[in-house]
């Protein structure tokens, strides 16, 4: 859309207000940081001699965007009691006040992409825990007195978190729960992408014709032309395609995962027989019920919503741990994000009687030191 065209903008505002007048509660605004374009149309550098050069520098958070965002807010959002969250690639915490500040912000929350950028298609599986802590802590502290974070692990443009940063084979359940607890109790509003709450995994369809994403298909043709084999390219696709997160929701172990008795638009992950909502509803130890318990605890404890976030053990290469503090209350969230044992000293006296949630059965313990099993996660009330 040409946002320089006032008639176009007014048509968009009319459409938005039509929906808001119907009573909807808000909008998730896709790619909102890309609406302003650099009008110089200059060529971008291409030192690698690629056939196509990414264009982000010409349209991602380009100077002048806030004039459009301010008008959008004034003409629509500000007139209603709604919630707005914008997909805002390229936005930094330093700009938070202009995007989500109480006075100057244009929306309530933004999805930032920095922690997603820690992953690359050609990288080893697993997460750089130290870098993850640095990025998420920067956003937690950067918005602490300014705005409100949108917390998430998965979306429609990335692969499944348990396949990417967890271990979908040996520690499928444990790693899905550990990743969940890691982000869920931070300051902000947690978002759960469909299927994440049951630990849905990446899929391995055998042929490129089984895939729907245009970026995946284009990559396949380019890699094939460069001399890569079908088998080599499919290995990359299995680990990187956006279609991994776009398979139909797995409701039951029946045909097509219970999504439909007709053929869906896209293939169903064959593991729906084992990973589905119906089976997890009946299993008290399931990933789904773990998410339900986290939601319940979060709703009961104001400190886990509004409390200050403070990182501990910043250099630990396995464990992501932080506290949430409000007045005299404090909680500790500690998550091992690796498939091996981790030994830590929290400098906080912990007691098993004050452990509210975990993904392993634990014995009686008291003290500052913990030995965490692979992908173990614990939530403690400290005081």
Image (cartoon, helix red, strand yellow):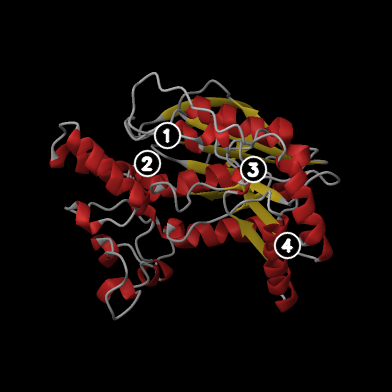
The mark lying in front, picked from 2 and 4, is: 4
Choose the circle earlier in sequence order: 1 or 3. Answer: 3
Tags 1 and 2 in contact by the CB under 8 Å rule? Answer: yes
Q: Residues within 10 Å of mark 1 (few under 14, many from 20)?
A: some
In the image, is 347 to the left or to the right of 220? right
Going from N to C along the chain, the mark reached first, 2 or 3, is 3
Q: Earlier in the sequence, mark 1 or mark 2?
A: 1
Residue of label 4: 10
Q: Nearer the viewer, residue 156 or 300?
A: 156
Residue at the image point whose x is 43% and y is 70% from the top:
281
- Taking depth in this image into account, of 256 and 365 the one nearest to the observer is 256
Question: Any mark on residue 36, and which?
Answer: 3
**Residue 283 seen in this snapshot:** yes
Label 1, label 3: how far apart the Cα atoms are: 27 Å
Q: Which mark is residue 119?
A: 1
Relative to 288, residue 315 above or below: above
């Amino acid at each position: 859309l040409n946002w320089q065209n006032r008639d176009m903008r007014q048509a968009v505002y009319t459409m938005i207000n039509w929906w808001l007048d119907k009573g909807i509660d808000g909008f998730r605004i896709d790619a909102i940081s890309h609406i302003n374009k650099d009008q110089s149309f200059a060529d971008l550098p291409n030192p690698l001699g690629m056939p196509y050069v990414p264009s982000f520098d010409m349209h991602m958070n380009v100077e002048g965007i806030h004039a459009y965002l301010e008008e959008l807010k004034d003409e629509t959002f500000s007139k209603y009691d709604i919630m707005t969250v914008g997909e805002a690639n390229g936005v930094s915490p330093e700009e938070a006040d202009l995007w989500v500040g109480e006075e100057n912000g244009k929306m309530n929350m933004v999805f930032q992409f920095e922690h997603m950028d820690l992953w690359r298609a050609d990288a080893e599986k697993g997460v750089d825990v130290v870098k993850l802590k640095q990025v998420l802590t920067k956003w937690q502290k950067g918005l602490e007195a300014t705005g409100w974070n949108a917390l998430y692990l998965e979306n429609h443009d990335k692969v499944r978190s348990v396949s990417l940063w967890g271990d979908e084979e040996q520690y499928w359940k444990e790693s899905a729960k550990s990743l969940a607890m890691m982000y869920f109790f931070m300051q902000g509003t947690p978002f759960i992408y469909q299927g994440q709450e049951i630990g849905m995994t990446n899929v391995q369809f055998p042929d490129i014709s089984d895939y729907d994403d245009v970026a995946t298909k284009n990559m396949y043709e380019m890699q094939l032309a460069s001399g890569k084999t079908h088998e080599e390219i499919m290995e990359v696709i299995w680990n990187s395609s956006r279609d991994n997160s776009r398979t139909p929701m797995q409701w039951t172990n029946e045909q097509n995962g219970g999504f439909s008795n007709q053929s869906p638009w896209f293939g169903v992950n064959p593991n729906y027989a084992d990973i589905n909502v119906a089976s997890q509803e009946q299993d008290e130890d399931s990933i789904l019920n773990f998410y339900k318990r986290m939601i319940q605890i979060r709703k009961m404890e104001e400190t886990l919503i509004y409390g200050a976030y403070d990182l501990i053990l910043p250099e630990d290469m396995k464990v992501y741990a932080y506290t949430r503090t409000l007045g005299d209350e404090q909680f500790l969230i500690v998550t091992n994000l690796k498939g091996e044992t981790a030994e830590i000293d929290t400098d906080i006296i912990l007691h098993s009687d004050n452990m509210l949630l975990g993904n392993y059965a634990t014995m009686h313990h008291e003290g500052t030191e913990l030995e965490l099993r692979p992908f173990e996660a614990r939530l403690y009330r400290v005081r």
